[in-house]
Amino acid sequence: MKFAFLCRQRPSSSKLRIAIVGAGPAGLTAVGFLVCRGHEIDVYEKLPIPGGMMTFAIPRYRIPLDSVMEGVEELRDKFGVKLNLSTKVMCGERHDEGDELAVNSVDLLKLVEGYDTVLISTGTWRSRKLGIPGDDSKNVVSALEFLLDIHVEELGLRPSHLGSFKKVVVIGGGLSAIDAAEESILKGAGEVYLVYRRTIKEAPAGEYEIRRLSRLGVNWIELAAPKSIIVENGVARGVVFQRMKLGEPDESGRPRPVPIPGSEFEIDADVVVAAIGEVPTPPISSECGGIGKYVGKDGKIAVDRNFRIPGTNIFAAGDVVTGPSKIGQAVSQGLRAAKELDRFLSIKTLVAR
């Protein structure tokens, strides 16, 4: 995976320093463009290996780790990019998934002062909760936690927190649900259930992916929503579901799931995976001075059409701006933001002269 695809060797230095916060697809794509413009790049990443969800959440058959690392090593060895790994950047306080792997911390405002520009590409590292009784049990996890745990163990960074499991219930119909269900099969689970509150036709992952999983042995159950977690001594032992029917369209334009009274049923499980979506995780809290106001209630960073936080030298791109998206969209955003950032620096340099 080649990130510096616009040049074959490092050009003469512009002497301009840029901090990239987040080494996922958007951030690494931006780095690749900016090094070919001669800028000095320092990357800050909270995880111990670059790549973001390409490394720690997406299955290897989708994106091979060797391919990602080949591109990262080229940025480091051939283009002089400095990688500050296991380093959490934050202005204010907030804990997100994967933060436990960070051993260092840096204040975002210090980066803003110490670099000519900063690009934020921190993605979506916080998951939505089920919001039902028992969802705080230790073996009820988000899809992101589940996938992160599997990949961290595979990479030899720490033992799995989940241990072995035989019966897995995955709740959701998006790609993270697909990935969690498939990884469960690959890890040797004997029974895997994928449960979605609408039908296969409305599932965000698409019919093809769900039917593919069914052929692998995953049990697909549609028109069912979780009502509560069955808990024994603080440990989840199963899920109570309620059958649903489709009603009028909701704000998303899809038919609204409507509960059917008296239709509850149970599925046993030793791991319950909530794959109901992630939210953006900007390195900015509401306490972060004047820039905190540019983070919405949904966590997205509000930028102008040039990907810049108005009145600052801070740019942002990828899922932290758009919300959860596919890799291609994040790559496109990273490239577009890098071009605007480079243009900003060019104008700034001309004015300074």
Image: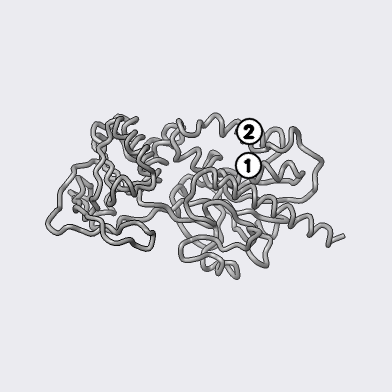
Dot 1 corresponds to which residue?
Answer: 83
Q: Quadrant of the N terminus?
A: top right
On screen, 236 above or below 349? Answer: above
1 or 2: mark nearer the eye: 2
Of residues 65 and 87, the one drawn nearer to the viewer in this rendering: 65
Three-letter amino acid code at the position of disc 1: Leu
Q: Is residue 341 found left or right of 180 in the rendered image?
A: right
Q: Earlier in the sequence, mark 1 or mark 2?
A: 2
Q: Tag 1: Cα neighbours inside 10 Å, few (<14), some, or many (≥20)? A: many
**Residue 148 screen position, x and y as percent:** 42, 41
Label 2: which secondary element: helix
Q: Residue furthest right?
A: 353
Seen at 17% across and 48% down, the residue is: 232
Dot 2 corresponds to which residue?
Answer: 73
**Residue 324 screen position, x and y as percent:** 47, 51
Of residues 148 and 235, the one drawn nearer to the viewer in this rendering: 148
Cα distance between the residues tagged 1 and 2: 10 Å
**Residue 180 screen position, x and y as percent:** 36, 40
Q: Tag 2: Cα neighbours inside 10 Å, few (<14), some, or many (≥20)? A: some
